[in-house]
Image: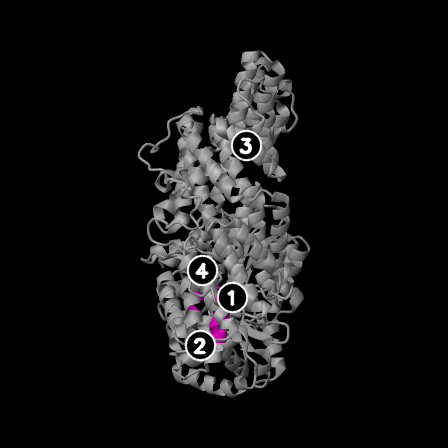
Amino acid sequence: MRSARAAARGSRAEIAEITGFLADPHICGVLVIGASGMGKTTIINGVAANLDPDVPVFRFRGSNLIATRKLGIFEVLLSCEGEQADEIASGAALSIMSRIFEREHSPVVLIDNADRVDEHSLSIIAQLAAAGRIRLVAAAETIRPPVDLLAALWTAGKMVRTDLEGLDETAIAAIARETGGELDDRTIADYRRKSQGNPRMLRKLIVGAASSVSSRRGADHRALWNVLPEQKRILEMIAMAGALPYEALRNLCEPELLDNLAERGIISITRGRHAEVVVVEPAVAQSLRDGVQPSHSLQLLRDITPVLETTPLVGAALFGQVRWTQNWGVPVDEVKVLGAAMWANERGDYTAAIELLRDSNSEDPEIYLELARAERGRGDAVEAEHIVDRLISSPQVGEGSDRYLSRLACLELRLTDPRESRTLRTEWIRERLRSPVDTGRLDVTRAHFEVRGGRLDEGRRLAERVFRNRSCLPRHRQRACSLLGQVEIMCGRIECGLEYLTQAEMMFALPDTTSFEVEDSVPQIFIGFYLAGEWERARSTAKRIGAVQPGSVPVAALVDLWTGHFTRARQTLSRVVAKDSQRGDGREIMQSALHLAEGLLQMRETSNRRASSASVDDRIARFRRHERGNGNSVAGATSQPQGLPDADYDWCQDYLADLLELQSHALTNPAKHADDLCRLGAEAAERGAHALAVYAWMEASRHGSTTAQLNLPGSAESVDGNLGRLASAVAKTRSGDDGESVIAAADEALKFGAIVMCADLARSARDRAVQNGNQAAIKQARMLLDSSLRTITFDAGGADMSAILTTMEKQLINGVAEGASNLELGDRLHLSVRTVEWHLGRLYRRLHVRDRQELKGIARSLA
């Protein structure tokens, strides 16, 4: 019941939307489409509860018992009129039902399970709705006959269609909490993938309660009511396996039976050489599995096994057959187990792969290697290390195939701290490999290892060798392409790097791309777009990171800090840090970003660049802990790192965390930390990462570091693209000049999207112009300052513009948006023209706008 209430709360938006549609005189009704268990009945009930009490409501519910009976849903109403449904002609039925409905003024007709209503009844409903006699809300699983009668109204523009989507991660977490549990992000994402957000399926997964026989004859079985016994047997086989080859099923039944199930939307059949058949709705598949008794399951397995032995199995069908067979304790060929586990790993289902591999009880090194890959993917790096250590220490390690050795070396690279390359024990494998497929796999993984260790030139050389070799697999070349894009941007060749990243994104569509390539490449693509200042593309990539890596850090908050959305960044980062779920540098960069967000928010509240920042004094900067200034960090590739080895260490992320931390400290004491920022930039420049260097040197230069002011022009020449133009503009600013160069730098910062930098530079330029009495420069500086402050003041998730405006101010803004003059505004509000002008001037100052044209833009955002 608690989970049902949580699901109902998730449907409030749909209920409110449908209720609003019913109030529109130009719309005759709403068609709600959703799979079994998606909450259609909940929405129908919610709509009925939200209607005006004076509105008459007629409720009908289709069922399998009356689906074939003429005017079945109207039997009760007709019997009250002394009529018999089976004796009424179609025209008379329309007249009688119209007369019944017309007794009440504009009634609302609600029909649940519309796909279980007879054609005559829906035809009458459709005609009455089209004529405006009734307002209709109908819910159905799919648009198949007879629901197509109502769908015709939708295609004609007379009805609105609402397709129910599955619950998101937030709703799933709420259901878990209300049922007495707390799920981590990875489990929540796994539940959503398995259930596709279906509330009924989610409850079964979270609560784990077995359905009773009576409950199984519920909504999940409505799609199966008219299924033939031969079809039911085939559906049970598909549900138990998860997926089966189409060719195998054709040997067990007539193709027409499968086609009929596909036409009714119960199963789907993929295309291609190895076509697979799956049950469309997860809740229906779960219902079928629940209804299969153990003895019947064993019999189904015995019936399908001889057919599967003669059919080539791949993908989901192979995985389903191996899992089903293992559940009965039957030994499975190691080659099949390995293939099924590799498929599960490729799609990111590491838990299922681990269960499959451990149940095989095999001692094959290939099985153990795949198990180590799954354990690492699930997050258990310690167990993965133990397995890899045993495989490398085995006396028979040199007897493995080139493919096995290549994958073993790759996995060791992923489990080794990139600052400790001397500890690798499989470097001999590279000389033994002959196939470009195997060398490409190892070289691109080694390139990633080198870049994470801060050895950019070596990483780029290896990645380019793979990318240029067309004999390598496309998925390995895709990984190399994304890595090349990141490295080129880090080194300042931004335009070239963006071309690589664009190509890498396009290569995701290649047929052999797996979840492994996506998980490996997407973070690199994000870092590239982030460093290049491509904020919208970085945001899009951040969403993809959350989709492929559940529980990953919300990197979009880093973009928010640059673009002026401090409140949203702090809200996001506070949740992450409070959960204490992140490890290593991912957590450290989020903590540093949170410190900067807190400092920027306090700066905004005090409107003072030198505002005191909370908790700065009681924090120990990561920069101080690493002692970057002593030169050890630059030689970090060979020096012994402090603390335990960290296989997830990434030099670029570590650098960005230090940069954010120093930026937060510089908010309160810029002179003290300007030299630290300068030394940070020097480290990046020594490694050839000129883009990273100019980020640190721009901050250090603005805070008064003379060394950074000398270094920035030369490094800016090595950076192209938008970042290079910004760095060059900042490099031209000098203390004591007339402020023109500062205005140019502020303008470039605004174009780049660096809102905070623009505000600082514009404020500095305004102060200089005021001292020099340069009115033109004052106007330009104020324009830039207003543009940046408007973004900072009304950032998403922060101050609500509508909440701080009075009713009269909102009316003034709306009037300006409509083009009304001051005289017309005064007539509307009963004010004098001078009073209107005074209020508008006050609005200009509060909203940081210059004129009525910019105020119109505010009105659009307010609407």
**Residue at x-position 41% and y-position 60%:** 415
Pointer 2: what residue? 323
Check contact, mark 3 vs mark 2: CB within 8 A.
no
Give how far across and how far down residue 730 sits, in percent: 56, 29
Mark 1 and mark 4: Cα distance apart in space: 16 Å
Reply yes or no: does residue 341 show up in magenta: yes
Pointer 4: what residue? 414
Pointer 1: what residue? 430
Mark 2, mark 1: which one is toward the viewer?
A: 1
Pointer 3: what residue? 712
Is residue 95 in view from this perspective? no
Q: Residue furthest top?
A: 773
Amino acid type of the residue that numbered disc 4 sits on in the rendered structure: Arg
Amino acid type of the residue that numbered disc 3 sits on in the rendered structure: Leu
What residue range appears in magenta?
A: 337-352
**Residue at x-position 55% and y-position 47%:** 528
User: Which part of the image, by quadrant, shows the C terminus?
Assistant: top right
Q: Nearer the viewer, residue 160 or 474?
A: 474
Q: Residue furthest right?
A: 156
Amino acid type of the residue that numbered disc 1 sits on in the rendered structure: Arg
Residue 127 located left or right of residue 670 = right
